């Protein structure tokens, strides 16, 4: 009975959503203006699919932005022409990373739905985009509006167990609009949480590719003597946790673990890397226990991979992960990992006892036990780190990831592949690259 009611409501809300998308498209037709100094490029000779990836923002410390930069580096440009945009302006560091690949991340603004959709449609027209890949609910809805009537495919690429599509009404709208669209998931946990019932389009789980920086001279781990820079004794046991300060990341357990270790007279220090809305509450929690002077808040860092050189054991008490980038980066650095055996993808990353330890979620005592056990058996900790690195090199290879994404897009839109390969755009001598000086976009 409940499922029948849900389906009825879904159809009703879906019809409303379809009307919203159609209305948005009509408004775009009447209100669309090219933004000032919009660059209109001449047609290209490449037969590659032109794909634009749209995310909420592009900070240097974000998991999805890191995934996108890895993908941009590894894609075969003869098959995929990569474009990227975000609602908020990209951070300068991410802009530089994309610029180094001869790519220019674009911002479409975050005012409602129609204004970003107009700007996104402008990018679609400017670059003759074939496929829009959206990573959030708002990005997906804007992509549907911008693509309508233009023979542009839309893919929903989900990275979170929750947060991407929260609330009954949004989920009902999502279920209707995505019925026939391709959907990608970064883990089985995300697929199980987000795949709509009755979905008819292509869908696949593709784990993110994570770059191995072992041979990168700019990403070499900091030497142990650098510990003193962060107020950590050279001979102390160093733990780290990399995560945004939000409730389900469960910093309370990480901090509680340090207090428990202090009670046991274990000379350990904890590096907390990240920012977020709950950071002040975490600071108060840290001050309230015996491990207060051993907990170090480092903020957002662009040198996270290098900081892992200072770490003996990586802990990850998060109660929910769509993927777990920080966990994989620690494993690639050959660090033994103790992570919460909770909802999400972490249990897909770690084979407990061999490539890491899975610990009861929310238990500072259990995490402290895991840390003491690893610290007391350095040979086991070292072998666990070696096995973790080998597992991640095989499972999260960036080239394999890029190939899987490419195949998914090509197989989901075969007609576009044929169109590009049979009729590649040929530049005309009479169509030089121009800059259109036109009226601005209405807000």
Image: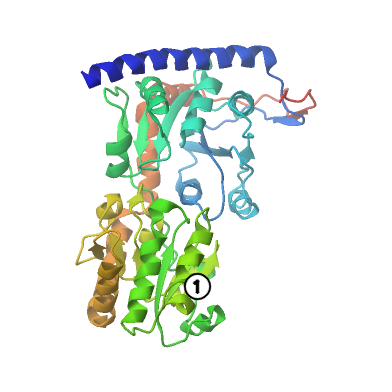
User: Residue beneath label 1, please?
Assistant: 296
Question: What number of labels is visible?
Answer: 1
Q: Is residue 333 visible from the viewing direction of this image? A: no
Q: Is residue 419 left or right of residue 195?
A: right
Quadrant for the C terminus in the image:
top right
Q: Nearer the viewer, residue 236 or 307?
A: 236
Q: Is residue 68 above or below residue 369?
A: above
In x, y percent, where is residue 128? 58, 26
Q: Position of residue 217 (x, y in %)?
A: 52, 70
* Residue at the far bottom in the pictured view: 235
Q: Residue at x 59, y 11 (%)?
A: 26
**Apparent side of residue 344 relative to residue 18 in the rendered image (left or right):** left
- Local crowd size for mark 1, using a 10 Å CA cut-off: few (<14), some (14–19), many (≥20): some
Residue 287, horizontal then vertical, whole percent: 48, 72
- Can residue 148 be seen from the camera position used here? yes
For residue 6, side relative to residue 237 (left or right): left
Position of residue 196 measured from the top left corner of the image (x, y, whole percent): 31, 28
Along the horizontal axis of the image, is 426 left or right of 318?
Answer: right
Which sits in the foreground, 124 or 364? 364
Q: Is residue 289 above or below residue 38?
A: below
Quadrant where the N terminus sits is top left
């Amino acid at each position: 009975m409940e499922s029948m009611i849900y389906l009825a409501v879904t159809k009703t809300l879906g019809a409303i959503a379809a009307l919203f998308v159609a209305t948005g498209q009509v408004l775009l037709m009447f209100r669309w203006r090219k933004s000032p100094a919009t660059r209109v490029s001449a047609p290209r000779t490449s037969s590659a699919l032109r794909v634009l990836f749209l995310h909420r923002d592009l900070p240097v410390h974000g998991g999805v932005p890191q995934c996108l930069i890895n993908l941009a580096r590894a894609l075969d440009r003869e098959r995929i022409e990569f474009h990227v945009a975000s609602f908020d302006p990209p951070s300068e560091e991410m802009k530089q990373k994309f610029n180094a690949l001869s790519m220019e991340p674009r911002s479409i603004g975050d005012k409602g739905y129609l204004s970003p959709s107009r700007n996104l449609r402008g990018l679609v027209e400017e670059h003759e985009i074939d496929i829009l890949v959206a990573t959030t609910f708002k990005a997906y809805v804007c992509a549907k509006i911008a693509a309508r009537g233009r023979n542009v495919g839309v893919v929903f690429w989900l990275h979170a167990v929750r947060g991407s599509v929260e609330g009954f009404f949004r989920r009902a709208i999502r279920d209707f609009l995505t019925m026939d669209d391709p959907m990608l998931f970064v883990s089985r946990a995300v697929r199980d949480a987000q795949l709509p019932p009755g979905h008819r389009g292509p869908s696949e789980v593709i784990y993110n590719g994570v770059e191995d920086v072992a041979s990168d001279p700019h990403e070499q781990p900091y030497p142990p003597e650098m510990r003193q820079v962060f107020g950590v004794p050279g001979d102390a046991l160093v733990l780290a946790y990399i995560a945004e300060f939000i409730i389900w990341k469960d910093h309370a357990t990480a901090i509680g673990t340090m207090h428990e270790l202090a009670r046991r007279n274990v000379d350990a220090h904890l590096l907390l890397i990240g920012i977020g809305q709950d950071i002040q509450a975490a600071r108060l929690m840290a001050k309230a226990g015996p491990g207060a002077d051993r907990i170090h808040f480092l903020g957002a860092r662009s040198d996270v991979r290098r900081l892992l050189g200072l770490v003996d054991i990586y802990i990850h008490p998060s109660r929910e992960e769509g993927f777990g980038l920080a966990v994989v980066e620690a494993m690639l650095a050959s660090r033994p990992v103790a992570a919460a055996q909770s909802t999400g993808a972490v249990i897909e990353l770690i084979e407990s006892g061999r490539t890491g330890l899975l610990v009861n979620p929310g238990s500072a005592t259990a995490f402290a036990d895991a840390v003491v056990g690893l610290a007391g058996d350095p040979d086991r900790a070292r072998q666990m780190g070696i096995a973790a690195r080998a597992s991640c090199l095989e499972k999260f290879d960036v080239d394999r990831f890029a190939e899987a994404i490419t195949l998914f897009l090509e197989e989901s839109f075969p007609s576009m592949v044929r169109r590009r390969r049979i009729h590649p755009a040929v530049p005309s001598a009479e169509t030089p690259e121009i800059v259109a000086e036109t009226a601005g976009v209405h807000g």
